[in-house]
Amino acid sequence: MGIKAALPKYEIYFYNTVLCLAMVWAASWISEVSSSNANRKTFKSSVKPGWYYFGRKMDTADFEWMMWFSTFREHILFALSGHVLFAKICSMLAPQHRSLVYMVYGLLAVWTSMGWTYVTLILSHCILLYSISLVKLRWLCFVTGLATLATFKCEPFVSWQADFVQGDFELRHVLFYGGCGFTIMRCISFALENCERKEGNYNILELLKYNFYLPFFYFGPIMTFDKFYVQANNPNLARKEREMWNISVQGLIHLAAILVVDILFHFMYILTIPSDVKLLKHVSDWAVVGLAYTNLVYDWVKAAVMFGVINTVSRLDHLDPPKPPKCITMLYVFAETHFDRGINDWLCKYVYDYLGGKHNNVLEELVATLCTFGVTILWLGPCQVVLIWAFFNCFGLNFELWTAKFFSMEPFASFEMAMSEAMSRRIRAIFNTFNFWTIVLYNILALNSLDFAKLVAKRLLLRGFPITTIIVMFVTYCLIQVIKERERRQALIDDPDPIPPLMQNKLPP
C-alpha cells in the first residue's frame, strides 16, 4: 500500500468527528476530577494558588516548566537577550568573527552563573576528548566519551565533580548536569567528526566555539559538529525570503502555546493526579486513559516550546537547529518515536544508522538498536524505570521490522496486492492502533511512573475489557486514519502525481 492511498471524504469526516468528541469527553472527566480534588491533602505540594481572581489553583508539578516560564523566567530571558544583542552587533561589524563572539559571551555567561571552577571542569573534559580525537580512532573516541559521561552517573565521581560548582542556588543541580552532559555529547560529536576528516585536524578553538554557544549549552538541543561548523563559519548572512517573518510567527506560536499550557494547568491537574494512586483507583476509565494520552502530548508540547525558544534565538544567529520533536498524536510506529530530535539525530548519525546500514537486515538492526539504547540508558542515567523503558522500546523497534518482513512473504503479500489500496490502508490502521498504545504505555514509564503505567494497562486491557478496550481502540483507529490522511496530503504536496497524457493534451498552451 502506498502512502497516497485515499479514503472517501465522508469516512474521513466521520473519523474526525469521533476523535473530537472523544477528546472533549475525556477532557471533561479530567477537569471534573481536578476540580473536585483541588484541596486534597496529597495535592498540597504541587497544586499551588494560581488565578486568585478566578479562584483557580495551578498544577506546578513540573519543575522544568516552572523553572523556564515562572521561577527563573527573568534570568533565562536576560541571558538569551544579551546573547541576541551581542550577536546582532557582531554580525553587523565583524560577521567573520561571530562564532568567536558567541564563544566569548557563552564562556562569560557560564562563568558568571556557575563559577570559574565549573568552567575549569568543562574545559578539562574538552581538552581530554580533543586530545583523544587527534589519534583518529573512532572506537577510542567513543569509549573515552562514554566513560566520561558515566562519571556523571555514578559515585564517587559525581559528588567530586559537583564540588567544582560554587554557590548554593536552586538551579545549581540542573545547570550542572545539563551543562556537563551536553558538553560530553558535543565533544564526542567533535571527536568523531575529526576522525572522519581526511587531512589534518580541527583546531581546539573550533571545539570551544561549538561547546560554549550559550543557547545550546545548558539545555540543548544537540547540533552535530559538522552542521554547526559549516553554519557558524558561513560568512554569507543573507536572509531567505520571508525568513524573519517565519521566525516571528514561530515566536508568537511558542508564546501562544505557553499561554495555553498555563490555562490547562489551572483546569486540569494532569501531572499531579497520576502521582496519587489511591485517587486513580476511583476515577473513571476515560479519565485514566485521557491522563495517559494528555501526559504524552504535554511532554511533547514542553519539548517543542523549550527547544523552540532556543531554536528561535539560534535562527536569529543564522543557524539551522534541529527541528522540534514529532507530536505523539502523529506517531504510530516506533521508528519515529522521540522527544528530543537533537539527541535522536546524534544517535542516528553516530550509532543507529552507522551500525544498522539500510535497516533491512534483522541481525544488524538488533545490534544497532541494542547499542543505541545502551547509549541512551547511559545518557538518561541507569535506573529501573529507564532500563524497562529502553527494553520495551528496543523490542518494539525490532518487532516492527520482524512483522514487516513476515507479512512481506507469501501468501500475505499476494493478499494485499489483491485488495484495494483503501482496504489495505484500513487493515494496516488496525495493526497501527495496537502499536500506538504500546508506544503510549512504554513512554508513560519514562514520563510518569511504573505504577501509573501498570494502572493504565490494567484499566485498558483487564478491568475495562471489553467495553472500554473496544471503544478506546476504535477512537485510536480513527486517530490513526486522521494521521494517515495528513501524511497522504503532505506526500501529494512533496511528490505530486504526474498528470496523465490525455489530461496534458487538454491543457491550454
Image (cartoon, helix red, strand yellow):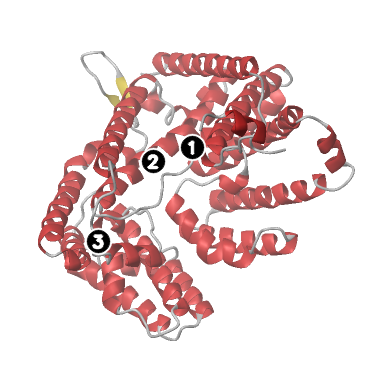
Total numbered labels placed on residues in the image: 3
Label 2 sits on residue: 304
Secondary structure found at label 2? helix
- Which residue has dot 1 on it? 327
Q: Residue at x 47, y 72 (%)?
A: 147
Q: Taking 117 as reference, is 29 left or right?
A: right
Tell which of 413 and 18 is nearer to you.
413
Quadrant location of the N terminus? top right
Q: Secondary structure at mark 1?
A: loop
- Locate residue 172, reporting x and y percent: 26, 55
Q: Residue 85: x, y in percent?
A: 12, 52
State whether residue 436 is above or below residue 396. above
The amino acid type found where label 2 is placed reads Ala
Q: For the point 17% across and 51% down, which residue is it?
A: 84
Q: Residues within 10 Å of mark 3 (few under 14, many from 20)?
A: few
Q: Is residue 17 above or below residue 129?
A: above
Answer with the quarter of the image where residue 167 lies: bottom left
Going by the numbered disc 3, the residue's amino acid type is: Asn
Tag on residue 5? none
Cα separation, mark 3 vs mark 2, equals 29 Å
| Number of residues whose C-alpha sits closer than 10 Å to that of mark 1, classed few (under 14), some (14–19) or many (20 or more) | some
For marks 3 and 1, give the one nearer the viewer: 3
Give the labeled residue for mark 3: 236
Q: Are marks 2 and 1 in contact (CB under 8 Å)?
A: yes
Residue situated in front as seen by the camera: 475 or 276:
475
The residue type indicated by label 1 comes to Cys
Q: Earlier in the sequence, mark 3 or mark 2?
A: 3
Q: Nearer the viewer, residue 372 or 291?
A: 372
Comes first in the chain, label 2 or label 1: 2
